[in-house]
Structure formats: structure tokens, C-alpha cells
Amino acid sequence: SQTIHQWPATLVQPVGSPLSLECTVEGTSNPNLYWYRQAAGRGLQLLFYSVGIGQISSEVPQNLSASRPQDRQFILSSKKLLLSDSGFYLCAWKHSSYEQYFGPGTRLTVT
Amino acid sequence: KQEVTQIPAALSVPEGENLVLNCSFTDSAIYNLQWFRQDPGKGLTSLLLIQSSQREQTSGRLNASLDKSSGRSTLYIAASQPGDSATYLCAVPSGGGADGLTFGKGTHLIIQP
């Protein structure tokens, strides 16, 4: 069966510090991978998606970037965090069916 | 741009009641709709996926319907239980690449024991 992991589970970082969040998927190959953010009082927003290694598309302009160095690994990064980057970050995957499956999330607080 | 609205934003009912959660979307050219459940501080759990060729989908006490022409979906929960307390989210493909989803803000459901 397929499993999706995210780490860390929680993170508190000062403004201006770098960020690296990791997502890995087990039990499938060549999945579509997604990063979403859920900010307080707002709905889930798609940030990035990837259809293959090294292929990244951004849905919204922002302070963040994404990379896919391996087939089942998706990384969300920032060089300098802003207060507005605080939120709950969710990674998701999809294969041949249309159904998306989500990871447990990372709670990021920028202070 | 696809927009998704969920009504009501919050709902509190006694245990045992049947209830309906509503979802509407602005662009009816969708090929599926997905309902999720989110417990506090947790990720999303997929409940039901309805393809555009289907009118409804059932899983246990949950039944979801889809009316593309009117831009609406409903999630019906039968015989509600305290364990059903959670936020329920509706999502449709955004129309962009790779089937990224556009979500509603959810319905926060509390089932009173």
C-alpha cells in the first residue's frame, strides 16, 4: 500500500531564516506530487506541483520554491522566511486515478 | 478561475441525526469532485471521489452527489456519531496543470453525544 511521509511535523523559525520541508511517498512510482498551504482563516491553496523528477510548476508567486530530486521525494524550500509563510503545509500525491492522497502535514510558525 | 463555496461554515447537531453538507463551484467543466475529512491538526483523509459521469457515490454512512449543470455537490451523513466531528472539505480540479485542486473553506461539524 502507498504511504506518504512529511517532516518535520512542527517547526518554529525566525523571520529571515531558511526553510526545508520534505515529503516522501512509498509504494508507488512516478506519482504527481503537490504542495498545498493552509493558512489561518483561509482555504487550502495549491503552491506547487510536479509530474516528474526535476519538473516543477508554481501556481502562485511567492517566497517559496520546490524541488523534486528523486521520483518519490518532494521538497519545499525558502531562502528567507516571512511572517506570512506561517501555516500548515500539506504534501499530496496522485497516480493514475484522479484521487489525491495527503500527508500528515507540517505546522510552520514564523516568529 | 474556479471558486468553491461550502455551506454552512459550521454545524452542531445531536448524535443520530442525518445531515447534509453543501458544496458549490463556479466552473461546471469539472471531471471529478472529491470530499475530504480533516481532524484538528491533521492531514486530509479522502472520503469520496465522484467522477463527472457519476451522479453519486456511497461509502458506508456517507453519500455524495454531484450535479455538474448546477455546480453543486452534497455530502449526506446518515445516523451521525460523535466520531464524525471534523472539518469536511470539498475540492475540484482547478483547471490548471496536473489536476491540482481548488478547495472550499470547509464545514466544521460537531456531533454532540
Image (spheres, coloured by chain):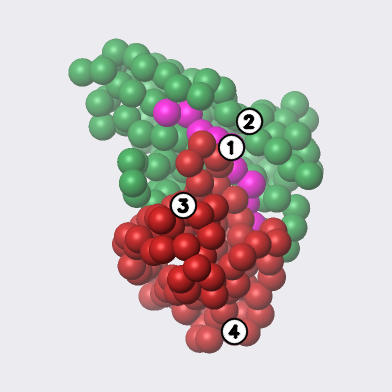
Chain colours: A red, B green
Q: Amino acid at mark 3?
A: Gly
B69 relative to B5 in the view: left or right: right
- Density class for disc 2 (Cα within 10 Å; few <14, some 14-19, many ≥20) is many
Q: Chain of mark 3?
A: A
- Asked if residue A59 can be seen in this view, the reply is no
Q: Nearer the viewer, residue A99 or A8?
A: A8
Relative vertical location of residue B6 with respect to residue A75 in this rendering, above or below: above
Tag 1 residue: B104
- Residues packed near mark 4 inside 10 Å, few (<14), some (14 to 19) or many (20 plus): some
Q: Amino acid at mark 2?
A: Thr
**Subunit under mark 4:** A
Name the N-terminal-most of marks 1 and 2.
2
- Marks 4 and 3, Cα distance to the nearest angstrom? 26 Å
Q: Are marks 2 and 3 in contact (CB under 8 Å)?
A: no
- Do the CB atoms of the residues marked 4 and 3 lie less than 8 Å apart? no
Task: Indicate the quadrant where residue A109 lies.
Answer: bottom left
Left or right of residue A75: residue B87: left
- Residue at image x 55%, y 80%? A68
Q: Which residue is mark 3?
A: A87
Residues under numbered marks 1 and 2 in contact, where contact means CB atoms less than 8 Å apart:
yes
> Number of labelled discs?
4
> Counting residues from the N terminus, which is met first, the one under dot 4 or under dot 3?
4
Helix, strand or loop for disc 2 = strand
Instruction: Name the residue carrying label 2.
Output: B5
Mark number displayed over residue A53: 4
